Amino acid sequence: MKGFLRLLLVAAISVSMSACGDKAKEPTPEEKAAQYADSIFKAIEDSDFDQLDVISEDLNGYIRSIDESQGEAFGEEFAEQIYRYSEKYGYGEDFADSFLAACRRVLGGEGLTPPQYPAAFLPDTYEFYWTESPDRIVERLWSYRNRFWTDERRSKAASLGLTPEDVATLASIVEEESAKRDERPTIARLYMNRLKRGMKLQADPTVKFASGNPRLKRILAKHLQKESPYNTYLHEGLPPGPIRIPEAQTLDAVLNAPANNYIYMCAREDFSGYHNFATDYATHQANATRYRRELDRRGIK
């Protein structure tokens, strides 16, 4: 149906964006997510595509107006609502199957493996005629991504010993590690330090991805043993592909990460969203102990 592709792209963008700005007032982010999902599908059902454009603009404005914790709550609820409506109206499986088949044809022809498909796209708002074929849509999205990958950026990646797909994979982990954009270059360099030393990344976001539970709040020993090529506690090097579609800004954060000697990191015990970094294991253990104590104090299991 005309407009539905735009809806899915907006949904994907809203979930992958990190929200920022002042805290929104009532209703709650979860309630707003339900309202937006309902209004989007009502506009589609009524074939009111002008209204769909208005909703999309308002949606993106709302995302920019809320802070990071509310953004996460909104994104999770919005994704769930979109999935429910997609199933209800019979859009989900057919669209997903067609899009994936187009990825196999187009991106497979470019040498990408299925786990690398997320590296072929950049979060943004895209518009297509409703008559566009799935192959043509993927081709255009791929071309937008390639515009980002200038000769200069490719040269920077090569100097780091990385391919564009590797950079996207690393950037996806960095984004999942921290919603703080000013901290991401430091984290990116830390992971590259570990790769250079032949150390396992031991990145918690890859464990969450391998577990299939994105809401996992505390990584336990049993999660670290989950067998998966994405579990960087078990396997050396980068996982097979990105664990999310990273923003262009995070790709640049990897390519331009300033030098540091950090090889360890742990979330700060003040729950600010920032991390404590360390160059030695003893300091890291002290940081981790403080964080675990705060988790216990708050009753986070």
Image (spheres, helix red, strand yellow):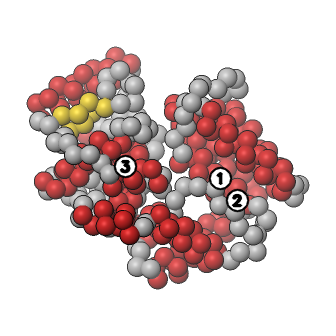
Q: Nearer the viewer, mark 1 or mark 3?
A: 3
Residue at screen point 39% across, 37% down: 182
Amino acid type of the residue that numbered disc 2 sits on in the rendered structure: Arg
- Residue 281 picture quarter: top left
**Residue named by callout 1:** 10
How many neighbours does mark 1 have within 10 angstroms: few (below 14), some (14-19), or many (20 or more)? many
Q: Nearer the viewer, mark 3 or mark 2?
A: 3
Residue 172 visible in the current orientation: no
Query: Relative to residue 99, is residue 273 depicted above or below?
Result: above
Q: Estimate the x, y position of residue 114 in percent, counting from the top left.
A: 44, 71
Q: Earlier in the sequence, mark 3 or mark 2?
A: 2
**Residue named by callout 2:** 6
Which label was assigned to residue 253? 3
Query: Relative to residue 152, is residue 277 depicted above or below?
Result: above
Q: Estimate the x, y position of residue 220 in percent, counting from the top left.
A: 29, 37
- Residue 24 picture quarter: top right
Question: In terms of secondary structure, where does tag 2 sit?
Answer: helix
Residue at screen point 70% across, 34% down: 32
Residue 40 visible in the current orientation: yes
How many neighbours does mark 2 have within 10 angstroms: few (below 14), some (14-19), or many (20 or more)? some
Residue at screen point 52% across, 59% down: 122
Q: Are marks 2 and 1 in contact (CB under 8 Å)?
A: yes
